[in-house]
Amino acid sequence: MGYECPVCSVPHSDAEHLANHLAFTAMLHGDEHEDWLAEHAPGWESANPESLAPVVADAVPETEFEQVFEDTTEGHDHDHASFEDAVAEGVRDGNRGSASATADHDEVLQEAQELTRRMHEDAESDAEDEASDTESE
């Protein structure tokens, strides 16, 4: 069971994932996703996924579909871009619907990129620490 996007029919495992899909697509592309949210979830722009999910779930019936997740399949023969790459691509191509690029959008994107960079640095540092701890034992 899950939820199918009422705009583009992409399946999602739960209402929170569908809420994220609708909101991110609306923010990046505008289009019918933004229209659907405006009609069914007024104020969605300021909602978090936890508060938007129940609103979306009330408006979209649960659907049964076969789920296949990347971590349950073998032999992927294609690359997956990171979320940050997808956001940057959407911004670079101007795929944000009628919404104009604002300082707030740019600031959020820069902050996300910085947090991601730090996260990767922390993970690398942790891996190096574990490796040196293992070597010293």
Image: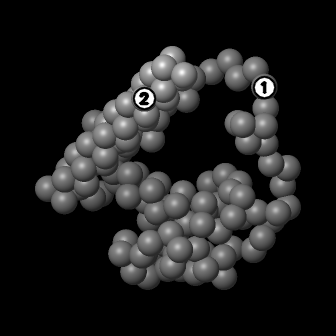
Task: Name the image colouring.
Answer: one colour
Are the two marked residues, 1 and 2, in contact with CB atoms closer than 8 angstroms? no
What secondary structure is marked by label 1? loop
Q: Nearer the viewer, residue 9 or 125?
A: 125
Image point 66% across, 76% down: which residue? 57
Q: What crowding class fits label 2: few (fewer than 14 Cα within 10 Å), some (14-19), or many (20 or more)?
A: few
The location of residue 102, given as percent across then percent down, is 17, 56
Q: Quadrant of the N terminus?
A: bottom right
Question: In the image, what residue type sits under mark 1?
Answer: Glu
Asked which secondary structure carries label 2, the reply is helix
**Is 106 placed left or right of 10 in the picture?**
left
Q: Which residue is mark 2?
A: 129
Which image quadrant for residue 65?
bottom right
Query: In the drawing, does residue 6 fall left or right of residue 88?
Result: right
Horizontal side of residue 38 vs 90, given as left or right: right
Quadrant containing the C terminus in the rendered view: top right
Query: Can you give x and y, in whole percent of width and height, for residue 47 in the image?
Result: 42, 75
